[in-house]
Amino acid sequence: MECIVCGKETEEEKKYCKYHGEAHSKLYETYERWREARPISWKEYLDEVYERDETGKWVREIIDHIMQ
Amino acid sequence: MSKIMIITEKPTAAKKIAEALDEKGSPKEVQKRKASYFECSRNNDILIVVYALGHLFELKQTEPGWKYPRLDTEWVPKYEVIKKDKSSKPLINLMNKLAKDIDQFIVATDYDIEGSLIGYLSLVYACNAEPNKATRMIFSTLTKKDIVESYESPSSLDFPMIDAGQVRHEVDWLYGINLTRALTLSVKNVAGWFKIISTGRVQGPTLSFVAKRDYDINVYVPTPFWGIKIIGEYEGTKLEIEFEKKKIETLLDADNIVKDLRNTSATIKAINRRKRTQSPPSPFNLSGLQSEAYRHFGFKPSRTLALAQKLYLDALISYPRTSSQKIPESIDVKQILKNLETRKKYSAEAKQILKIEKLIPKQGEKTDPAHPAIHPTGNKPTRRLTPSENKLYDLIVRRFFALFGEPAVKESIRADLVSGKHKMYLRGLRIIEYGWMRYYKPYAYTKEKEIPSIIEGESLSLTSIEREDKFTSPPARYNPSSLLKVLERKNLGTKSTRSGIVDSLRSRGYTLNDTFEISTLGYATLDTLETYVPRVLSIEFTRHLEEEMGQIQDGAQRREEVLAEAKRDLLTLLKTFKEQEKEIGQALVAGLQRYWKAKEELGPCPACEDGTLIIIKSPKTGKRFVGCTNYREKKCEQTFALPQKGIITPLEKECPHCGHIMFQVRSGRRKWETCVNWTECPGRQEDIQELEKRRKQRSEKKEDKK
Ligand SMILES: [Zn+2]
């Protein structure tokens, strides 16, 4: 399989390469932390994370992909 | 009367040595074709001072063929290996000719591993001399006094040091050449392309941990947290007050704290004063100097080394490639200070230090068997120093001064305040004794913070309480200086090779800029090595070799044994490689294809004939823009601005308004097409307005949330 973000070869039947896979799980994990910190919807969360300078570039690529 | 040949490392060193040893102080420079030497006389002897230009000899495989494995090497003149090299031939020929009627050979190259090896190879291969009969001049500065002393009491050649140098070259050659060929040929055999994919004994592990940091940054998702900004007032003075918790996890908690504290006052429960003495800093070794020069002037470590080298050759400072943080008693610090006293710029400080009865410089922990810590010689510059040289020299002089200073004494004050159930702090700092900091100005400074004299039981009114919205940040990127420190801490490479390794990551295309962002090629190479030959990336493996080389220098290991072991290990590694060559090649080819695609070429440059427009990220600001590939050669200065957010994909069409090439931007849910000339293009003013509008909306949204 090829990573649906960057086209790199992936392990077995996974959708993402190991880099985008990690960015993807970090993005989902961190949503829980945001929700504990303050009320926020998934959409708002993605928008805000996308705009922040601290956000990693692979995470931003994942968001690009989700929002498409 | 004897004829003595002195072998030095560089023309400038040769001249300094000849001037110091010639009885009249004016040696004759004899020009021979494209080389020269110095002739002088001393005690009825004729002294011939020749110079190398770094290494004149290089390793070459004994068996021909651009193949692997190749395990056997010999030393040959540099021009036989590096075809472009024009300077080694005349120098080797000159040494060879002059050596014929020499009675005594003296090696006077830099006293360290590389210098000793350069001297040895010149002696053996250019002069055909017997190394056991040659002697060694050892000095740490190029001042006349040190040169004459070392000439008058020479030692024998330092063979353990020479062996250590030789084995380092051999091992690095073996790993660098064989692994690079293995990688490059795996690509060639799969795809037919010839693109050098390099790795090396130290480069592999270095790339590996630089990439680990890049990875952590690339997968980083920030989380919000809050702080409380408190301003208090005491007798009309506004004071910044610190809330007890720096990090508040939830918005609700933060809002409640603000509510609790608004329109209240705080009582002073306790006042703690703490005096702290701070000893002078240690003398500079190379890495200490490099990190301080980066901190104050932004000089890259390799640049600091080059500048220090020049100051050394001018006899202004001692030998810079040292690990030592010690100023031994043999160094006449009083004389150095007296010399510095005659310089207007340093006279006040030097005068003051000379009043101290016992001049005992502060010593650091680290040692070096060959050289003392970096210090000024006290000599006056005989030429005008460049601004950068001046900066570095000033830093070295002032650090030297600081070694003689008293400890600095600082007092920190912390008042503990309470309002309801919340605690907070008021902090102050003042310097009671400047001590050594006086001498190290402007490189030592502490921001003092005055607080009014308050007493326990009094209260302050809290005039302003604000919630601060914050986010966590990813780990910091490496810079050339911090990376160098990590290499040193991990014991990778040596003080003379580290800065070259740091630079090589960039020149090999593995990193994109000075913040060590890893390129697609870097990741592709790394992934492949990790999957198929992880040992190449292992820090333990190369550190083990490093330790063994250290043992050779200490006389505890034999060069032949270390080399044999390194060859055995390499052969095993190459065998594993060969068995998987096809898979490795395929993985690298796929990576290269992505690398070329990711280079984000937009199309031909409109300003010059043969350039291509590419997307560049500014190393200074981190902002991206479009530049021309001819920029590096200073042939074209065409640039265009780019929107900073979103994914850019080139479009193979021209702008209908201005004719410039076009690209697509995809940012979140929005997608639009524009041209590289968008900021100027008459047809695209609405793009700019749109971007401006979105920016405004974003900041308003942020305001609303407050
Ligand atoms: Zn991917």
Image: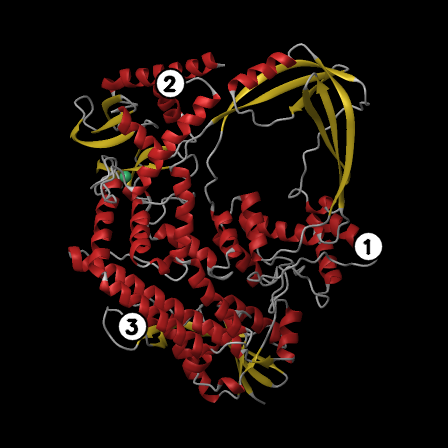
Res B189 → quadrant: bottom left
**Amino acid type of the residue tagged 1 in the rendering:** Ile
Camera-nearest residue between B705 and B377: B705
Q: Position of residue B454 (x, y in %)?
A: 80, 22
Q: Disc 1 and disc 2: Cα gap in Å? A: 70 Å
- Dividing the picture into quadrants, the one containing residue B173 is bottom left
* Ligand 1 positioned in quadrant: top left
Note whether residue B84 is visible: no
Q: Residues within 10 Å of mark 1 (few under 14, many from 20)?
A: few
Marks 2 & 3 on one chain? no
Q: Secondary structure at mark 3?
A: loop
Label 2 – label 3 distance at C-alpha? 62 Å
What is the secondary structure assignment of the residue under circle 2? loop
Provide the residue designation for mark 2. Answer: A41
Q: Which residue bears the numbered disc 1? A: B356
Position of B132 compared to B625: left or right? right
Note whether B224 is above or below B75 in the view shown: above
- State whether label 2 is within 8 Å of ligand 1: no
Q: Quadrant of the N terminus of chain B?
A: bottom right
Q: Which chain is disc 3 placed on? A: B
